[in-house]
Amino acid sequence: MQENETRPASERPMIDREMVTRQHDTKIAYDENSHLIEQASYRYSLQERSSPNLYRALFDYQSVPKVSFNHRFVPINMPEEIWITDTTFRDGQQSQAPFTVNQIVDLYKMMHRLGGPKGMIRQSEFFVYSEKDREALAACQDLGYEFPEITTWIRAATKDFELVKSLGVRETGILVSCSDYHIYNKMGLTRKSALDKYLGVVKEVLSLGISPRCHFEDITRADFYGFVVPFAEALQALSDESGIPIKIRACDTMGYGVSYAGAALPRSVPGIIYGLNHYAGIPSKMLEWHGHNDFYKSVTNSSTAWLYGCSSVNCALLGIGERCGNTPLEAMVMEYASLRGTTDGMDTTVITEIARYFEREIGCEIPARTPFVGRDFNITRAGIHADGLMKDEEIYNIFNTEKLLGRPAQVAISATSGTAGIAHWLKHRCPDEGADQYDKHSAVVKRMKELIDAEYASGRTTTMSDKEMVSIYREAAEEIKN
């Protein structure tokens, strides 16, 4: 047994956390994040190429993109603090008719209420190019909310930096595309010239005292060790030198990210977050994930980013955005509650207000079966399910939707609803008529079923409307009374 091991812990010499020593020519150091003595990470340098690496084995364009595995596993590393950011008024707005100033202000107010007193929706991102954009931004600033903090997105042009400075915004997003698809094929640059250009832009923004948020566009098709890590390290060095925080937004622009354990880069979400944190030294609070839903993976990938060390996930209300959309903000509210065991003060009932506002004021058609916000998300049509709801709502409702979303579990009446479905509808949708007194065995309910069955026997295929159901109830009740 070594001498130190026989002494009380309080008397043992402290580890010099700044010390770097050599053992068999391998550098080791105490890591502040893992609280372990670790071998110093390999320092990745920019790998210049004469031609782009398009990962043709994965993305041949003529078939569904492939997922490769290298069976390398990285540890889950949930940050101490996680939160949500919003891009409804930037990326989300690109997918539909622009919002009016009043609509932006109304939605921003609801987002503030949804985020709660702790500001769980930390930031909201705005365009600044049109007079309307700037008017909406100023109107939201005038509300005086701490959260969501208003941030912007700009092009890499000096006049844009001055514009952001004049608006009194503390942080702005800057597009810094990082895949060879963009660097070589879109911009006509090389990795070295792109890196130099990006760093020059960031330095200009820093000189104005503004915090840059660097949008690593198309990171799930980028050369992670040959470009992403060296670029991220260079940004961290600029941040250390200037004393101004620089965030990195990892953008899964095409929705190629996967959460599978053992999946290989560039598509591995755990690998991307671990690598930025561990190899590039980017703190969790400076990492943000921005996912798209082209392959139905945006919610899972965003949750995975949280789990593996990314503090922030970027979303849009109802998931609106380019092509198949962004990660739905309301989904990540529920994911937060699932992972943390608390809403941390978020007012989840506002989700329903937001959905109805989109339908009523903006004219957005929300698919009826969309989780949490679709009109049918907690409505059952099968009679056997309705029977279960009447006995115990928990059997067929995901949680207390009336408490958390202001939406009680309901049934829609169709050919398969049966007497249980009709009785449930009467109880919850027609109590003012005194209809909540009837159960599935009552004569009124049985007569209603006969009238409804006749409708479907004649060829009807759609569900019964509430107005029709009230009429059928009155008809049946009158017949039974007489």
Image: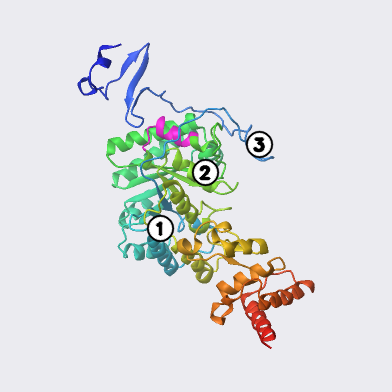
Estimate how packed mark 1 is, as few (under 14), some (14 to 19) or many (20 or more) residues with alpha carbons within 10 Å: many
Location of the C terminus (image quadrant): bottom right
Displayed quadrant of residue 133: bottom left
User: Residue placed farthest to the bottom in the image?
Assistant: 482
- Where does the image place residue 468, in percent across and percent down from the top left? 66, 78
Give the Cα separation between the discs numbered 1 and 3.
37 Å
Q: Are marks 1 and 3 in contact (CB under 8 Å)?
A: no
Foreground tag (1 vs 3) = 3
Give the Cα separation between the discs numbered 2 and 3.
23 Å
* Residue 258 in view here: yes
* Residue 176 in view here: no
Q: Are marks 2 and 3 in contact (CB under 8 Å)?
A: no
Determine whether 392 is above or below 228 in the image. below
Of the residues under marks 1 and 3, which one precedes in the sequence?
Answer: 3
Displayed quadrant of residue 278: top left
Determine whether 370 is above or below 460 in the image. above
**Circle 3 is placed at which residue position?**
60
Q: Label 1's element? A: loop
Q: Nearer the viewer, residue 72 or 49?
A: 72
Location of the N terminus (image quadrant): top left
Residue for point 28% across, 35% down: 241
Q: Report the magenta residues as a range.
A: 271-283
**Circle 2 is placed at which residue position?**
301
**Res. 128 mark:** 1
* Magenta stretch, main secondary structure class: helix
> For the residue marked with disc 1, what is the amino acid?
Val
- Where does the image place residue 67, in percent across and percent down from the top left? 61, 35
Q: Nearer the viewer, residue 227 or 34?
A: 34
